[in-house]
Amino acid sequence: MPFDFFRERSLQHIRAVMAFAFLFLAWGNCGSGQSDLPNAGSSPPATDASSPAEVPGKSPDEFRFTVAWVSTGGSYIYVPEKWGELRINLVNNRDEPRDLMCATYFQDQPNLQFGRRVWVPAKSTLRISHPIVIPARDPSQGRALNLQSLVVDATEGGDVLVKSNTGQMLHDGALLVTFSGRNTGLIGTTGTERDVPSAEVTDLVIATRVSQQLSNRYSLLLDQFLPADESELSSLDHIVLMENRITQDLAAMAALRHWLHQGGRLWIMMDQVDPIVLESLFGDDFKGHVVDRVGLTTVRIDKGPTLSNPDGDVGESTDHEEPVEFVRMVTSNIDVTHQVNGWPAAMTKAYGDGRVLITTLGPRGWMTARPPNSRQSEDPAFTSQWIPLASMNDIASDFFAMREPELIAHSAMEPQVREYVGYTIPSWGLIVGTLIGFSLVLVLIALALLRSGRLESLGWIGSLLAIAVSIGLLSIGRSYRDRIPATVASIQVAQAMTGTDDVRTQGIVAVYQSERSDSPIQVTGGGRMMPDMSGLENSNRRMVTTDLGAWHWENLPQPHGLRATPFTRAETVVDRLEARASFDAQGMVGTYSGRLSPGSDALIATRDGRLGVQLNGNGSFTARADDAFSKDQFLGAGLVSDEQDRRRRTLEKILANPKRKDYPDRPQLMFWSDQWKHGFQFGDTMKPQGTTLVAIPLILERPAIGSEFVIPSPLLAYRNQRNPDGSPPSTMWNHARKEWQERSVPATSWLNIQIPRELLPIQGTRLRIEMNVSGPIGRVEVLGLKDREVVSLETRMDPVGALAFEINDASVLSVNSDGGLILGISAGDPKRPELTQTIDKPGDKEAEYPSIKQDQNAKINYWRIESLTVQLWAKTIEPRENN
């Protein structure tokens, strides 16, 4: 049935809708409610469609349709221009099954519909959901978005509108959108009688949000079936997990994992859940176990040790009349930020673009009651009856932070993906041959006219001939242009999720159609994309979901030309993508596995550098320590092709993104493959083009005890370290920005070189430092610690350009139990300040150095360490008994 008919029917039934408004509210046919909940934590009224009440005058075999946009589950948060989830209840009281399709559209966009096609058995209730894109909304227009739903019966073929038991064919309702960022959701429990989270949990969530200048509103996800697609969680920035039932819902667990990997922040309260939650979420990557659960009446939360503060900070003690539950837990591959009695109380872990917070102390241990007369905001949405402790404030500032920007902007990939679709131009020989032929014919005609005495006719004959040749050349050019086949090109980044069989892909797909095509756009393996619909606003379009991860577009033509669309996709692969590596005397050796054949242009990428990789056909690879890339190098090839140049530009935008200096959080094996399919179908005759960057987290394995090996520089990160005398560290090295600062006076920076924890314990045998310097630095000295005393290892005077230092004294290359190797870099010459401070006035050059500093005519010259890398030769040793 045409979509225009639906709009006409909506106008005809508007009066009937108003007459039955109270009936809808009572029955929940157009369930509406708040998209976020107040601090009381109460959930919106649920719509129970499993036991429908009879309506006087209505036959029980009639059909009932309930749209539960907010009630009974969902994220409750709807954000403009993001995906959301629409929950629908269908009750079929007839004796035969029905094939139905529910379609919903916003009143501001009547030509864009989102629907779900389902089969409803006889005498049954079906509760379903389907994705929907919230339209753009100006805050001045208010939060309410009006939408309408209808049901089409396709049981006997064709589209027939179905009336509900109230006689309605069009169902009006509204949902509320939120314009605020940093939305928080709580995954609670449900059963025969709905439970709500404990007051302690909600009080702590509210208190931490208010402490970060956020509203006290949050969302409860209490439905029996949690969202099964990560796009349905995209409106949430933070999720607090406090129940175990998600472990019984594999689709929901996968959706949560994918949402986390995309940049979400997940808070797992171990006092509320069992360790199986961590095992299900992280798979083989979780390494730890729970020792026991105890109750504490006195709680002191200490700040955990850091590189700059190895001893940590002692916290304040609080007393509790009722014991606070504390889970004593042991884990090896997660950062401990806070401790209680030496046991981890708060831990954090990067996971893809997201971050996980794990707390083992009960909520009451992290907060205290607000004093009666304490000052609060006049806005009730920014008030709380509890105040988080200082330790929880430290945690909350990181957890409730804004999402990290996307790894690579779609706008950055679009110019590159368009390069895969180009026009074929006529060959040089064809064009030149045609012009030479035209010239020869013109000469022959001129000779013939000369003999016949009609040379004056050459003017109009030559003009006609030139026009004919021009038309011919245009026809040739057009025919070559029309030879371009319908093409679908893509550039995508496929990231494997450590310890699981899941892979998350993001990228951009460009579709070229030489002429209009009515081929459907569809997908069967999951993923989200909104095709470029510019110029199609007046055509009726409908996205129809048929199953989990399966949908297609109806009435959406593909116009002539080239259009690019970003997409995201998460999938579970049969052959897990996994890469393992160890070390030898040359560098790294390893293996990788998965469904892909060997790729090309491979490298190992870390936050601190890149290393060239040689992939072998048998699934193994090698990476020599000497093949470390320079700062601006992203490919190992010297002479690059057009395809390699596109790859280089993509890698540069990912690995040199100034907004994502945190990527990658762990070493990644990266290579390019042409075999990875994006899963979106635009027609059967489309020519595929494009490439995929595959990124696999690298699992490091420790060499056998006694083995000697070298650790390449990209795997040796360094941070500022407190000076040996206990004074604060120097700011000469800025770790956050990963750059050395300009200086004009001497400075010394002590560095803590971090060894990968998987290799510990080891003993260093040799160290090589390579650096580049610029400016009048005067002097560079490498310092070490021997028996806790500072010793000079090597000094260079008046260095210029590239420098190399070789340290062979094993006594200063010992690695502590935390994987740190301490070295100092001293730069600048205090005995020659005139190198950086000079005077132009004659006669003042013999002045004392203090007077030079005070002279207003003095010129300051700066020097800088442009780059510094280290390589470490070491051997594995036996673990100490106390470790």
Image: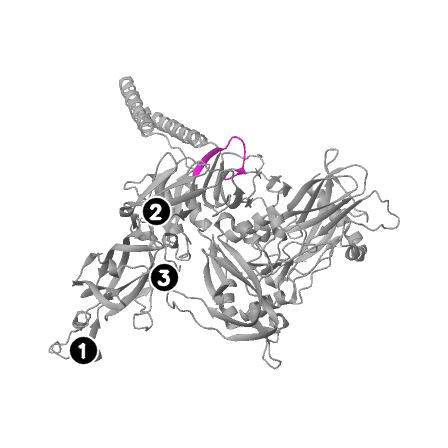
Who's the residue at 81% across and 43% down the image? Answer: 93
Tell me the distance, in whole angstroms, between the alpha carbons under discs 3 and 2. Answer: 36 Å
Location of mark 2 (residue): 704
Q: Secondary structure at mark 1?
A: helix
**Seen in the image, is 768 located left or right of residue 361?**
left
Task: Answer few, some or many: residues within 10 Å of disc 1's Cα (few below 14, many 20 plus, some between 14 and 19).
Answer: many
Q: Nearer the viewer, mark 2 or mark 1?
A: 2
Return the residue nearer the eye: 875 or 69: 875
Location of the C terminus (image quadrant): bottom left
Q: Secondary structure at mark 3?
A: loop
Tell me the distance, in whole angstroms, between the alpha carbons under discs 2 and 1. Answer: 59 Å
Location of mark 3 (residue): 737
Residue 671, x across and y down, in percent: 39, 42
Return the residue nearer the eye: 64 or 415: 64
Location of mark 1 (residue): 852
Location of the N terminus (image quadrant): top right
Tell me the distance, in whole angstroms, between the alpha carbons under discs 3 and 1. Answer: 33 Å
Q: Secondary structure at mark 2?
A: loop
- In the displayed structure, would residue 242 be above or below residue 477? below
**What's the amino acid at mark 2?**
Ala
Who's the residue at 41% across and 40% down the image? Answer: 592
